[in-house]
Amino acid sequence: MDIHSFFEEASSLYSVQDLISEHTNMIFILESPHKEEIKSGVPLAGLSGRSMAKELFEVEETLPMGKLLKQYINENKKTVFGIVNVCPFPLQGTAFPDQTFVNRYSGEIKVAEAVRTSSMKVFKDESRAEFDQLLLHHFESRLTTLLTENTLIVPCGRFAEKYVNKLTNKESLTIIEGVPHPSYHSWSRDRYQEVINKVREEGKKRTS
């Protein structure tokens, strides 16, 4: 078991870059990329991204959130939104496109999958604890470079919220809590309308 080598190699081969522009001051934090994101090289490129963009911008037809932001950035259109994954590479074995890589690191991928689905804040298992700390350090070092004094952080889902809560500078951040992951049309469900409205209003306020 070599957690460190797995983390380094997965980061180098299968990372999906964060989507940030010079105008970004509202960052959505997501868990990790999956098949569609690896294929397109953009975060939130699949169904979850489409569902998120539809609810955020209140439109029926739209590109997925990641592809939309990428288009804006490529065309030098101003957007206040950004996307950062806690983990830049997949946390599920099925999302890696290379079976040889999956076979070589099958044990390490099981560790990553266990960390992904666990609600534990501290891991007793040595391998999981090592992966958790590598992940936190990598996430914190990327996010810290992107923050300005008025950046709003929006963790989407329990995993993202867990790692935002672990940040050493958490107390100094402005955060909207309780936002679900945009999968399975959760952003359109009644139970989340209050918090999604809050996200929408912040977006409008910062865009205007």
Image (spheres, rainbow, N blue to C red):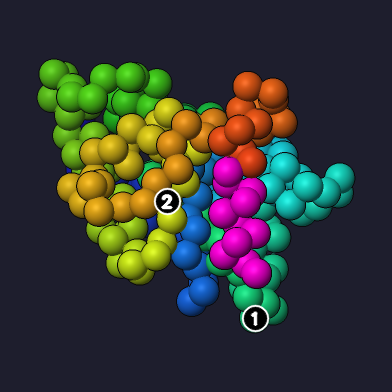
At x 33%, y 32%, the residue is 162
Task: From this view, report whether residue 35 is shown above or below residue 18.
Answer: above
Location of the N terminus by quadrant is: top left
Residue at image coords 43%, 28%: 158
Count neighbours of disc 1 (C-alpha within 10 A) and say few if under 14, some if 14 to 19, many if 20 or more. few
Q: Is residue 166 left or right of residue 81?
A: left
**Position of 81 relative to 120 (above/below):** below
Quadrant hosting residue 55? top right
Marker count (numbered):
2
Most extreme residue toward the right is 60
Q: Quadrant of residue 100?
A: top left
Residue 83 appears at what percent x and percent y? 51, 55
Q: Which residues are magenta?
A: 198-208
CB atoms of marks 1 and 2 within 8 Å: no
Q: From the image, state whether disc 1 or disc 2 is nearer to you.
A: 2
Q: Which residue is located at x 57 percent, y 64 percent?
A: 206
Give coordinates of residue 147: x percent, y percent: 34, 64
